[in-house]
Image (tube, helix red, strand yellow):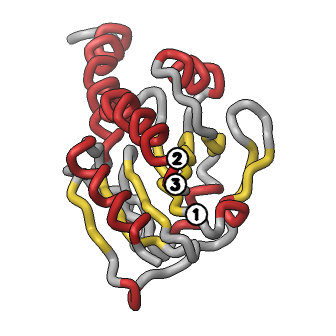
Amino acid sequence: MPGVAAIARAGLPLAVCLLLAGCAGGQASPGDAGNRFIGGDGTAQTIAVADRKTVGPVEGTTLDGRPLKLADYRGKVVVVNFWASWCAPCRGEAPTLQKLSVEHKPKGVEFVGVNFKDSKDQALAMERTFKITYPSLFDADGRVMLAFRDVPPNAVPSTLIFDRQGRVAVRIIGATTYSTLNPLIAQIAAER
């Protein structure tokens, strides 16, 4: 009969795999209905203008310690990306997000990250690694995410595009790509 230490060592790889799989979702607990995290495949959902919703107040402190309110970006298109340094798909899409943030800034488009349930030091290290220049709210306890109940991101990574009126116009659950995100940003930026 194996000892407790042997069972614990055998379970460690399984626990690591489950943590990484949880990056894109997984099943939520039964009491979590309405805010379920699901596996994301990067599919984009464009929301008709008449059906767009605003979110509750989104504010907090950035990873570098500055206050940030999403409401301060009203009048601009805002791409909000939910990410964590422990999430492999987040790391994979980081260069694309940075590139798009630079390309679309002259068109009145801003990017904001929401660093979710992460270590501040590891999140800052990831920003340095990928030379991320846009701000990210530090959401270690998941409170910022609560503002998105009506249009929940549901996976990490996820990306929301807000129109100039501060309403969610596009939701992408899971990692995204340049070829998916670029035309969606352009489409929402072209709206008047």
Q: Which mark is residue 76?
A: 1
The crowding category of the residue bearing disc 2, from other C-alpha atoms within 10 Å (few below 14, some 14 to 19, many at least 20), is: some
x and y percentages locating residue 98 in the rendered image: 45, 34
Considering the numbered disc 1 on the image, is that residue within a helix, a strand or a loop? Answer: loop
x and y percentages locating residue 88 in the rendered image: 33, 28
Relative vertical location of residue 137 with respect to residue 130 in this rendering, above or below: below
x and y percentages locating residue 73 in the rendered image: 66, 61
Q: Is residue 78 left or right of residue 137?
A: left
Q: Which mark is residue 109?
A: 3
The quarter of the displayed image where residue 137 is located: top right
The amino acid beneath tag 2 is Lys
The amino acid beneath tag 3 is Val
Residue 168 visible somewhere in the drawing: yes
Q: Which mark is residue 105?
A: 2
Q: Residue placed at 48% from the left, 76% from the top?
A: 150
Q: Which quarter of the rendered picture does the N terminus lie within?
A: top left
- N-terminal label among 2 and 1: 1
